[in-house]
Image (cartoon, rainbow, N blue to C red):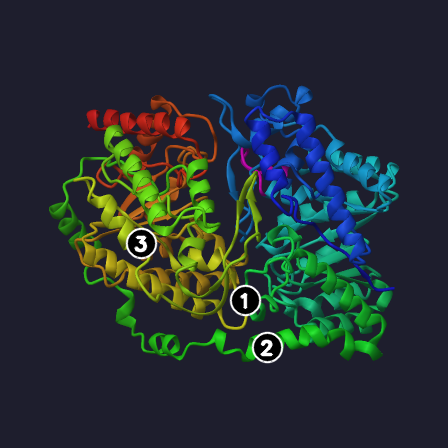
Amino acid sequence: MTRTAVLGLPRIGPNRELKFALESHWAGEKSAEDLLATAKQLRADNWRRAVDAGIDVLPCGDASLYDQVLDAAFGVGAIPSRFGDAAEADLATYFRMARGDGDVKPLEMTKWFDTNYHYLVPELEADQQFRLRADHWLDQLVEAHELGVDARPVIVGPFTFLKLAKGVDNPLDLLDRLVPVYVELLEVLGEAGAGEIQIDEPCLVTDLTDDELDRFVKAWKQLTAVEGPSITLATYFASIDQGDVIDRVFSVGAGEVHVDLVRAPGQLEAVLEAAKSTGTRLSLGVVDGRNVWVTDPDKALALIDRTVEVLGAEHVTIAPSCSLLHIPYEAAIETGIDPEVRAWLVFGAERLTELHMLKEAVLDPGNRDSLLASAREAINSRRTSPRTNDPAVDERVSNLKESDYSRAAGFKVRNEAQRARVQLPPIPTTTIGSFPQTPEIRQARKDLREGRIGQAEYEKFLEGQIKHVVDVQEELGLDVLVHGEPERNDMVEYFGQQLEGFTFSSNGWVQSYGSRCVKPPILYGDVSRPEPMTVRWWEYAQSLTEKPMKGMLTGPVTILQWSFVRDDQPRRETCTQIALAIQDEVLDLEKAGAFAIQVDEAALREGLPLQKRDQDDYVRWAVDCFRLTVAPAANDTQIHTHMCYSEFNDMMEHIIRLDADVLSIEASRSDMEVLDVFAGELSYPNEIGPGIYDIHSPRVPSVEEQEKLLAEAEQRIGRDRLWANPDCGLKTRKWDEVIPSLKNMVEAAHRRRGNG
């Protein structure tokens, strides 16, 4: 019989319970036992919710205290020696790997494929040995059984684990050492009663060589040879219909294969052709695990019906496209959203209901019209609503010309004009934008929201916070200042709240990494900017100092990527609308006197399609949208941009085409390795600020550590184009970490200047 399944569930808690438990534990306020009890209760609640929704196959082991890739590294003994003896590793070791400790640097962090979720990069050593630590999966399986839930353990696959790893020349060379540990894990879980096990191999949707695919097949045939549990091989985020990947996938003997038909519905026929000759069950990802719009039930059922026709109902599983980790818990509670728009929205709880509805429609086709009526009504309402279309925005976009995408002069001319306007020292120091969002700031925002203080009192409070940030930067000796962004709850949400076409949830939190959560805006209609958004705060901050104060904006691609974006028009068109809205703000800041304006594009690399055949088109329009945003700026206005956790090797020509006067990037955790491409054949010609202070760790990097990173950067790109800055904004850090870290950063820059 056709069944339903979920690949993974949200884990941070409906009210961010895990976030607060983690932070209390790290602060020494909550014991490890208390933390684990909170996590256990959240897992039980997740399973109960899914059982009540009628889901047939539930996950376990997907619930992590920090990150599923870190869980895999810890579970197979891939614990770098700097964290201590792997055989004695405990929960404290696990968190040291994630966050660092004193002089011990954490694992590198980067984005999970093309999502805004961050994972910890496995770090391997030349003599790497693997050793099973099965507790993470075994304990959760036992918990589920105790609650009467026959759950399916979820594991990051060995092929993907090594493809994502670093530290040795070719991590896949270690596959023969790693696979026996996975075999042992499957045996342990089978003995504990696991009837099915889900192994995620998302790297199969990326471009792979024949040798890599040969290694995958060899490894997986060993896994599927384990007697007992049936293995589900899960792919997601793109198609496996490239080269002979589909044939390889169906050759390994998995009991079930999951494919993402939201991102890649066109792969279905090729997948069916391969599946029908093997007897493999097919898991269809037909509801979106990464966005929040009501599923079009007729489109989903067309895919399901076709699969039932070819394989038979007993060989079909109805599932989300990927784990529900990437969407919030429940849309029904969002009473602050306009009812018309809210009717178009589906979060995690409603996704479960959709899955059950689709299954019922398969089992009872004669009753489909009744079952699908509500979803069809929501789809039609959204399609025809005047809320989604603004003729003025459409006209502005349609009138754009090619010349609207370029600045008036090249970098050399602009650089001379900027240096004549503001004289900065060699290796200028700055920060990326935000300063700590303290409990006092969050409380003031809450007091305003709940009516305990008025707007005037709130703005007076913000002025005090900005003055404090400016005073700190003056005392530290930074060269280009920022106002600290105390008025901003989030770098995307803040702008979305002032733009037409957006709505906002009150509790739509999703995990970004560890305890860090974000609440993405919901972009449902055409975008425009009614009035200036940042000028008032920039003018106040600039009035407090003679030093240049950066105007701080979030770029169009990042707003696009970090929002739940409408799926009823091309993303390029939506991004162009946002670019024009932010362009208006650039011009207003410039008119107010801003010398430096930073337009953050932290997520530009994140949006890159996973397969080369699709990448060029995306990067061209994404870079075009950034260029459109800043094109009207005067030659002597210095345009900055920032990108975090990005690899640029495969898109360097496009990074050059951004043509930002100053580009700042994450670099500290990679020890400046990311800069190698900037010094290569396609070297970046403009100025660069490689991050030398890792803000995602609570440790304070020393002067010597930061000076060493600056020296390595200078060796690669030269002094004339080099800036010193942290990796990213400082909003998640505490003042007692920020001040000494920035003091050391400034001193490191001064030492390098003295070596000139």
Q: Nearer the viewer, residue 424 or 528?
A: 528
- Relative height, residue 437 to residue 495 (above, below): above
As shown in the figure, which amino acid type bears the numbered disc 2? Ser
Mark 1 surroundings within 10 Å by alpha-carbon count, few (fewer than 14), some (14 through 19), many (20 or more): few
The residue that disc 2 covers is 381
Question: Can you tell which of label 1 and label 3 is closer to the viewer?
Answer: 1
- Relative height, residue 76 to residue 85 (above, below): below
Do the residues under discs 1 and 2 have CB atoms within 8 angstroms?
Answer: no
Q: Which residues are magenta?
A: 164-173
Residue 338, numbered label: 1
Residue 174 visible at all: no
Magenta-colored stretch includes residue 603: no
Residue 274 in picture, x, y percent from top left: 75, 64
- Relative height, residue 689 to residue 407 (above, below): above
Q: Secondary structure at mark 3?
A: loop
Q: Is residue 716 left or right of residue 736?
A: left
Question: Can you tell which of label 1 and label 2 is closer to the viewer?
Answer: 1
Mark 3 surroundings within 10 Å by alpha-carbon count, few (fewer than 14), some (14 through 19), many (20 or more): some
As shown in the figure, which amino acid type bears the numbered disc 3? Thr
